[in-house]
Amino acid sequence: MGTTKLITMYGSPWSERVRWAFAFKRLPYEKQNYEPGVDEDAVKKLTGQAMVPVLITGDKVIPDSSAILDWLEEAKPEPALLPKSAKERAIVTL
Ligand SMILES: N[C@@H](CCC(=O)N[C@@H](CS)C(=O)NCC(=O)O)C(=O)O
């Protein structure tokens, strides 16, 4: 899978959401801390917006926690974040 890097910010619920999912999947990653006012330009250059979390893996740069969780579920399906049935998925993602 190569190196997986997560740019996250302490205190950001969207960053926490992604960190929890990586911990649940037991998938190691390199951490990069985002500092508002300092790292904005660098992150904007990467994704077009000054927001975290951002995942960098292989040649992919993925901003947005939901998009990162989608990537994670595909990259490491087990243990699953979501139920298998469409009905149950709809319930938990409401
Ligand atoms: N929809 C985005 C929201 C991300 C977001 O709002 N991130 C905030 C922190 S919670 C941020 O990066 N703000 C930039 C800043 O404070 O400089 C996601 O789910 O990742």
Image (spheres, helix red, strand yellow):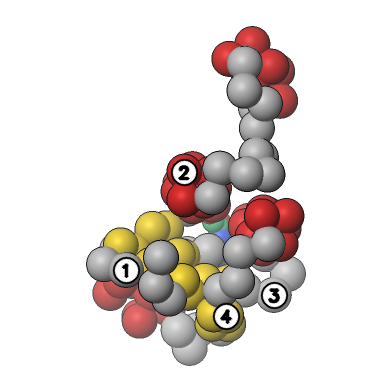
Q: Which mark is residue 31?
A: 4
Would you place residue 76 above or below residue 55 in this image? above
User: Closer to the camera: disc 3 or disc 1?
Assistant: 1
Task: List x then y, in percent, for residue 92.
Answer: 71, 25
Which residue in the structure is indicated by mark 3? 10
- Please state which amino acid type lies under the numbered disc 4: Lys
Which residue in the structure is indicated by mark 1? 58
Residue in view at x 56 percent, y 74 percent: 29
Residue 81 visible, this orientation: yes
Would you place residue 71 above or below residue 39 in this image? above
Mark before the other along the chain sequence, 4 or 3 = 3
Mark before the other along the chain sequence, 1 or 4 = 4
Q: CA distance from mark 3 to mark 1?
A: 24 Å
Q: CA distance from mark 3 to mark 2?
A: 26 Å
Instruction: Tell me if label 3 and label 1 are in contact, CB under 8 Å.
Output: no
Q: CA distance from mark 4 to mark 3?
A: 11 Å
- 30 or 7, nearer to the observer: 30
- Please state which amino acid type lies under the numbered disc 2: Glu
Mark before the other along the chain sequence, 3 or 2 = 3
Mark before the other along the chain sequence, 2 or 4 = 4
Q: Secondary structure at mark 1?
A: loop
- Please state which amino acid type lies under the numbered disc 3: Tyr
Is residue 28 found left or right of 74 in the rendered image? right
Which residue in the structure is indicated by mark 2? 74
Position of the N terminus by quadrant? bottom left
Q: Secondary structure at mark 4?
A: strand
User: Closer to the camera: disc 2 or disc 4?
Assistant: 2
Residue in view at x 67 percent, y 26 percent: 83
Residue in view at x 54 percent, y 80 percent: 30
Is residue 52 found left or right of 78 in the rendered image? left
